Image (cartoon, rainbow, N blue to C red):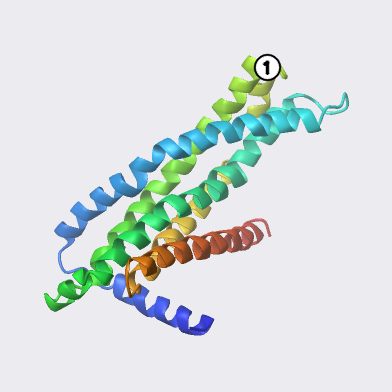
Amino acid sequence: MNIFGLIGRYVVLMGKVFSKPEKWRVYRRRIVAEMESLGFNSIGIVALVSVFMGAVLMLQMCINFESPFIPRELMGYATRETMILEFSSTVVALILAGRVGSSIASEIGTMRITEQIDALEIMGVNSASYLILPKVIATVVFFPLLAILSIIVGLVGGYAVTVITGIVIPDVYLTGLKMYFKLFSIVYALIKMVVYAFIITSVSGFYGYYAKGNSLEVGRASTKAVVVSSVLILMFDLIITQISYL
């Protein structure tokens, strides 16, 4: 199918997803369950990756900017800005695209090939909204919290490197963290994470919803969902950055 056909099917599906739910009470329960499944259960991997990202960033800054003309406080400043502006939003989103995106596509794709979605439609349930909308809301709400967690843990990882290696005096690192702080940087990171959350969930739901065939096709749908989500994340990273810093 050509790109325009895919976009058309995606837009039509999103129209069904965001149509008025039949019973909000049922959706509220599903949203809470999806927050636990897609958000809370991702805390571990996000924290683990972030602490090492912060540590490696700090080491790289110190190694590559070893000069008497560069204040050591800038190592902490550069680590903070890199974590906030890119790593804790874009890189974390790429990781979540693999974990969360493949999970969503597999779950919905399995329901499609086992005809559970057809059963929902026969019962008069808007299957697209029932299956995908709670996931979209849950990730849009929870993923920005994961971004904040990633920032904090990443900066702690950078601090741990200063304590363990002594490459920079810890107090100097902390001074760098406080330099030229702009609240807009945090807002910018959270805006990106909201957009990425929608991309990951909607694209994965799309490929899972239209999966057909056997279990092998579900695997292919999951792979496509991760690849397309990752490409769109990088594309929108460029677009949002360009718009935000005009």
Which amino acid type corresponds to the residue marked 1 in the rendered image? Answer: Thr
Q: Position of residue 208 (x, y in %)?
A: 35, 67
**Residue under the image location 44 percent in, 82 percent down:** 8
In the picture of the structure, the residue carrying the numbered disc 1 is 165
Horizontal side of residue 27 vs 50, given as left or right: left
Residue 74 visible to an observer of this rendering: no
Residue 221 visible to an observer of this rendering: yes
Q: Position of residue 57 (x, y in %)?
A: 66, 34
**Residue under the image location 42 percent in, 62 percent down:** 222
**Residue under the image location 33 percent in, 66 percent down:** 215
**Residue under the image location 55 percent in, 26 percent down:** 156
Q: Nearer the viewer, residue 41 or 177?
A: 41
Quadrant where the C terminus sits is: bottom right
Q: How many marks?
A: 1
Helix, strand or loop at disc 1? helix
Q: Nearer the viewer, residue 125 or 75?
A: 125
The extreme left residue here reads 123
For label 1, count other residues whose C-alpha is less than 10 Å away and answer few (under 14), some (14-19) or many (20+). Answer: few
Q: Nearer the viewer, residue 162 or 121?
A: 121
Horizontal side of residue 123 vs 16, given as left or right: left
Asked where in the image residue 105 lies, by quadrant, the reply is bottom left
- Decide: is 1 above or below 70: below
Asked where in the image residue 232 lies, by quadrant, the reply is bottom right
Q: Nearer the viewer, residue 32 or 51?
A: 51
Asked where in the image residue 56 lies, by quadrant, the reply is top right
- Decide: is 190 above or below 149: below
